Amino acid sequence: MAGLALAGAATKNMPGVTRFMDTNVTSAPVAAPKVGTARSLVEAAHETIRHEILIGALAPETKLRFEMLRKRYGFGASTLREALTRLVGEALVTSEEQKGFRVAPVSIEDLADLTRTRVFLEKEALRESIRCGDDAWEGRVVAAYHRLSKTEARLLTSPEIPQDEFELRNREFHQALISACPSRWLNHLYGVLFQQSERYRRISLVNRKVSRDVHAEHKAIFEAALARDADLACRVAGEHIERTLSVMSKVLAS
Amino acid sequence: MAGLALAGAATKNMPGVTRFMDTNVTSAPVAAPKVGTARSLVEAAHETIRHEILIGALAPETKLRFEMLRKRYGFGASTLREALTRLVGEALVTSEEQKGFRVAPVSIEDLADLTRTRVFLEKEALRESIRCGDDAWEGRVVAAYHRLSKTEARLLTSPEIPQDEFELRNREFHQALISACPSRWLNHLYGVLFQQSERYRRISLVNRKVSRDVHAEHKAIFEAALARDADLACRVAGEHIERTLSVMSKVLAS
DNA sequence: GTCAATAATAATTTCGAGATTTTTGGGAAC
DNA sequence: GTTCCCAAAAATCTCGAAATTATTATTGAC
């Protein structure tokens, strides 16, 4: 019964790894991790749909019908349901009882509120991080800044391709900056807001180049943080975020 | 087929309302809402388990096995799964892939961090609320304060019974205070933290009387808010929360 | 006696079917 | 022309079973 189960049921329970390679029956345990390193189908579905929402492939307020999602991604109803529930917790999806799920709406008002709140949290977290940061923290910041700079330089020459990579490096840099803040809750809440901002950035910057000198802004934050000048770092970081808001608002309004 | 479905399947899909009254077959649409006004079984399960966690009936770090939950509450596996996923989003439950769900742990460190962060958010929200509050806001605050005072008075004479009611009034009062804050995000994040605090309060105060004069503290916040003295209100509210922390920490440490 | 390998057990994860609710569209009454 | 009602269709919600994974118990070797 073991052999039977292995062959026929690989597509039943196992995560994306096995699910996406069902052409032959070989039990090769090799990795074909279409979606990161998901350890369950729910996690794979969660990551997939989250990504689709973040990049705008699933537009705001799109009705998320199970039939559509089933055909598009191949997950079962219960799996999709739980993945969507997770996304509701991250405020990327809204749900109304008996009426299903929708991609969370966007608006200029929400973006302004989100940005304001994010600046409020980031300033506090950054101040604490600068106060508490040790050598390991400095190392993380330097490393993240270096990787971000590389990606930014690459964007100048081949601007279109590595949008996902830029988002990743950008998030890593910002999270490295506040990673020495000892408050778990502040970190957690900031993460939620940052992801929301990421979505607005992706929606706004579809097929657009970054016009202003983002690299210079990152450099200013980086240097202020390493110099342990909390006041300066907070001011520069706040201006950085609000300048981003300004650009995004204009795009959204158009 | 309609009649058949109505009789036999009342326990299948409908929310707690019908689920908990399956003795007779009358189609009386009356309400017997055991769990609030849940519109689906998932919502009923969510509210039920959340309440059990908040009051400590499900102790921190308890393993939440589906078999146990199924027998205890009568919900199906998928329903329970989604309810637990919602609770993960509220940080009342933790989950580890392939290893199931647990009631979120508690610790003095987490309580301290939670309280600090909550004070940080509450001060900002309260300041904004006082700045933007109109007559309707004042009305809500007066009403909530009045109801809370009544409940507090009742607690002095019959201290044990209405713990749930006190929590409800207390939450309504605190949320009324910041309800004029125009930031949806600040309100949302504050709600998450407040619920966490509620849990610590309930765990700490099991079978204990409130020793200090909580009513006087509420009164001070109330008067400062209505006087539109933001600085005073923030200071008093912060002291109120931190005094609560002090009591809870001692209980938790014992 | 300890440790590793293996079988048995228990728990989680996933899917598909069945049931209910919501939505939609046509038709009659006013 | 508008409104209301009812039937049909589509979508959501729920459950139980099947399958995989994790955990525990047992056996054998060193």
Image (cartoon, coloured by chain):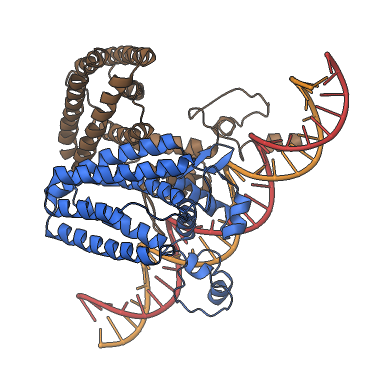
Chain colours: A blue, B brown, C red, D orange
Please provide percent x and percent y for residue A107.
46, 37
Q: Residue at x 43, y 37 (%)?
A: A108
Left or right, A80 with reference to B1:
left
Residue at 26 percent of width and 47 percent of height: A187
Q: Is residue A246 above or below residue A169?
A: above
| Image position of B185 with respect to A229: above or below | above
Closer to the camera in the image, A77 or D15: A77
Q: Position of residue A233 (x, y in %)?
A: 18, 46
The answer to whether residue A105 is seen in the rendering is yes
- Work out whether A14 lies above or below A254: below
Closer to the camera, A144 or B15?
A144
Q: Is residue A223 left or right of residue B62?
A: left
Q: How many marks?
A: 0
Residue B128 horizontal side relative to residue B4, left or right: left
Rendered location of residue A116, percent (x, y)? 31, 37
Q: Is residue B177 visible?
A: no
Residue under the image location 37 percent in, 57 percent down: A167
**Relative to residue A252, is residue A38 depicted above or below?**
below
Quarter holding the N terminus of chain A is bottom right
Q: Position of residue B218 (x, y in %)?
A: 23, 18
Answer with the quarter of the image where residue B219 lies: top left
Quarter location, residue B149: top left
Residue D13 placement: quadrant: top right
